[in-house]
Image (cartoon, rainbow, N blue to C red):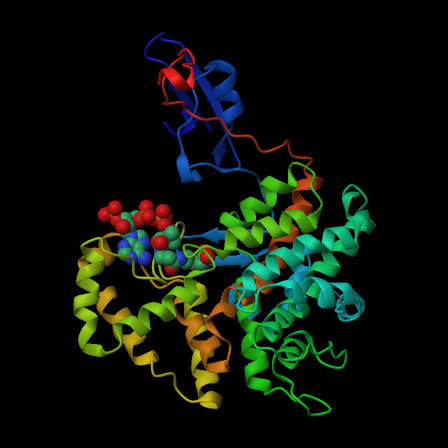
Amino acid sequence: MAGDQRESVTVVDNRTGESVEIPIVDGGVAASEWAKHMPGLWFADPGFGATASTTSAITDLDGANGILRYRGYPIEQLAENSTFLEVCYLLLFGELPTTEQMDAWVHDITYHTFLHENMRKRFMEGFHHDAHPMGMLMSAIAALSTFYPEAKDIQDPDNRYRQINRLISKGPTIAAMAYRASIGMPFVYPDNNLNYAENFLSMMWKVAEPTYEPDPVLARALDVLLILHADHEQNCSTTTMRVVGSSHADPYSAAAAATGALYGPRHGGANEAVIHMLEDIGSYDEIPAFIESVKNGEGRLMGFGHRVYKAYDPRARIVKEQADAVFEVTGRSPLLDIALKLEEIALSDDYFISRNLYPNVDFYTGLIYQSMGFPLDMFTVLFTIGRMPGWLAHWQELLEQDQRISRPRQLYTGVGERDYIALEDR
Ligand code: CMC
């Protein structure tokens, strides 16, 4: 039989008896072939659970086996040996840089961290005093498109490089600025003598000291968390980036839209939601009642579950290791014991086992950020800084693929045609 095996699927329309054979390419079948033979009969796939929206050579994610690789390199090796900026380069350009390429890349990022003064004085100071930093970050990223109108020239690779550079280098500056504005502290300018993570910590926490000296363990932990967040193939925010990018909008507009997608508690907002959940649970004794309420559908166990991972999220394991290193410096978070117990109970409960619900990257990151002193509403901002290179790598890939504008179909379920009735007659 093996000799008869064909790399294709055959679909029969039982209403007409017509059949169509569709070749399997790169592990998928082209929906365009289907559309050609079955016009008007659309695939129904809300939430895109079974749809590959693109081919991509950036990130390889095998959810069944808990495998995550950027450009072929296992996430464990990158977290152990690489730096966030090197990973940015890898994601964007496909290969690890040579020393010369790395020096040039780091230089370009370091020397684009400053923002136009109008962004600070007029734009950021215009927000309400308790504005959420994610709202500020999203708006500021969108506003950058007005400062760099040449970004609209998306077909020019040199121009694209400049905008990519700006989005990665200015993210931490905007994020720290949003935080400082929210607590009424003066803005700290970037320090070009510090590395990417150190400079961010400096802009966050520097007070009156001439030079801020970040704790190396905390700076490295932050850098590792940024690596873990750097890409995750076609997740909600990356898909948003690609959808908006497919209309040929400039990258600032697309990245602002992706930031909005990341903001939600089912996506990047989950790390903040985990801390709220752990604080609400409050003590060991309340854990069983909380688990029961989740099983009764009264809420979700935040930081658990994933659309793609049906095994332990490999990032969660690395985050747990980083948590140990961070707590050595900052002291143990009082919420850690509740988190560990919650994980232990959930992993032995049939409800979670049968649904393949394991801790995801967000389960422990919030605890680390909180111990490092980040306020809760900055957690998703940190995720945004980390995910930016992934969004940009996909945006660049989309343009190089010359992909069509994203435009899905719908299955209309509303009423049929009816005549308008004048207001006074209703
Ligand atoms: N707690 C309890 N039950 C859950 C959870 C959870 N966290 N996640 C899924 N389920 C249940 C869900 O109720 C459903 O049960 P049933 O089959 O009885 O109706 C089943 O598992 C399948 O759930 P789903 O909603 O179809 O799964 P999904 O793939 O659409 O959702 C998810 C994935 C990540 C949105 C979801 O697991 C969730 O809401 N998790 C909590 C939020 C979270 O931690 N998000 C961060 C994800 S990782 C970082 C990132 O990508 O941003």
Quarter of the image with the N terminus is top left
- In the displayed structure, does residue 369 sit left or right of residue 244? left
Q: Outermost residue, top direction?
A: 16
Q: Residue at x 40, y 22 (%)?
A: 412
Q: Is residue 412 visible?
A: yes
- In the displayed structure, does residue 57 sit left or right of residue 111? left
Relative to 421, say whether 162 is above or below: below
- In the displayed structure, does residue 341 sit left or right of residue 238? left
Q: Is residue 66 visible?
A: no
Residue 60 is situated, as x and y percent measured from the top left of the image, at 52, 52
Residue 129 is situated, as x and y percent measured from the top left of the image, at 56, 69
Quarter of the image with the C terminus is top left
Relative to 249, say whether 338 is above or below: below
Front residue of 259/312: it is 259
Q: Residue at x 67, y 74 (%)?
A: 196
Q: Quadrant of residue 214?
A: bottom right
